[in-house]
Image (cartoon, helix red, strand yellow):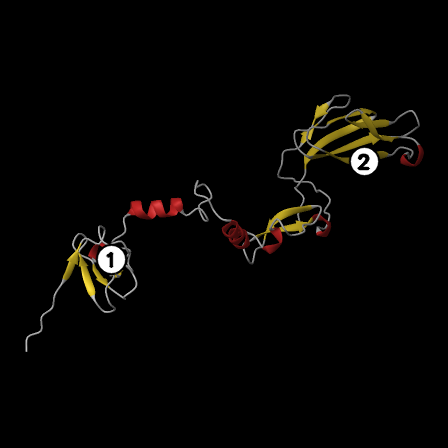
Amino acid sequence: MTLQIQNIYYDHSQESRIYERGVYSIDSITKRIHVHDGVTPNGIGTPITADLSQFATKSLSNVTQEDITNMLTNFGAVNMNSASPITTAQKDNLYGKLYFDGIKSTATLPASNFLKINASTRKVEPQATSTIPTYFPCLDTTQTSYVRAPNVDYTANRHCCVILNCSGTNNNNIGFFYIDDVLVWRVGIGGDRAAGGIFTKQFFVASGSVYKATGAITSLTEYGVKKLAF
């Protein structure tokens, strides 16, 4: 007994044929085998070598550096500098990974807050300023100190602490301290005066402010201060 197999061979892009289930045909142009199901025009095409070469190997040995660079450039959900559009779902997913759920636009944030990095999760989180303990600035002895003269305007080029000494032996022997032309302290009268006493005061002056001491000033020194810590 002789079995005869007849190949159905035609250009599938030019014709639309429907064959019974189990019949196969060959595309005369792409050389792709099509398996027919009795319904689908031209059947279901199977992959050929050219198709399989489009997929990366497990070791990426058939992927060029240019391919990888283009892939990363076009992956807009990760590379935010890319012009490729990203969906709202992708943005929410990105925010969820970089930050935490509370930073999404639909969440309620503290009225006064700052961003901090969580040391455990490495995520950026909002922190309410009301929960931060207040630390008074302290002197930073590693910064240069400056001896200042009385009766001279000095513009602070840093946040600083000005310490001054003033003699206050009588009501006429008094001292004054001004910040931005506002008198903030005077010594030598009332509770600040003691016979033969030398009074020491310190003032924290913000960067950019102008300060000046006048009167019975015996010494005036500017020191740097450390940043607030929280």
- In the picture, measured across the screen, residue 88 lies left or right of residue 170, that is left
Looking at the rendered structure, the secondary structure element under dot 1 is: helix
Q: Quadrant of the N terminus?
A: bottom left
Residue 218 place in picture, x, y as percent: 79, 28
Q: Quadrant of residue 83?
A: top left
Please tell me how crowded label 2 is: few (under 14), some (14-19), or many (20+) other residues with Cα within 10 Å: some
Name above or below for residue 178 compared with residue 107: above
Looking at the rendered structure, the kind of residue marked 1 is Leu
Name above or below for residue 121 compared with residue 5: above
Residue 53 place in picture, x, y as percent: 24, 55
How many numbered discs sit on the rendered protein?
A: 2
Q: Earlier in the sequence, mark 2 or mark 1?
A: 1
Q: In whole angstroms, how far apart are the C-alphas of marks 2 and 1? A: 85 Å
Residue sitting farthest toward the bottom: 1
The residue under the point 27% across, 51% down is 63
Residue sitting farthest toward the left: 1
Residue 147 place in picture, x, y as percent: 70, 28
Please tell me how crowded label 1 is: few (under 14), some (14-19), or many (20+) other residues with Cα within 10 Å: few
Residue 5 place in picture, x, y as percent: 11, 68
The residue under the point 68% across, 47% down is 113
Name above or below for residue 175 compared with residue 37: above
The residue under the point 9% across, 70% down is 4
Q: Which residue is mark 1?
A: 52
Looking at the rendered structure, the kind of residue marked 2 is Thr
Q: Who is closer to the viewer here, 126 or 89?
A: 89
Q: Which residue is mark 2?
A: 200
Q: Quadrant of residue 168?
A: top right
- In the picture, measured across the screen, residue 32 lies left or right of residue 99, that is left
- In the picture, measured across the screen, residue 161 lies left or right of residue 23, that is right
- In the picture, measured across the screen, residue 56 lies left or right of residue 188, that is left
Looking at the rendered structure, the secondary structure element under dot 2 is: strand
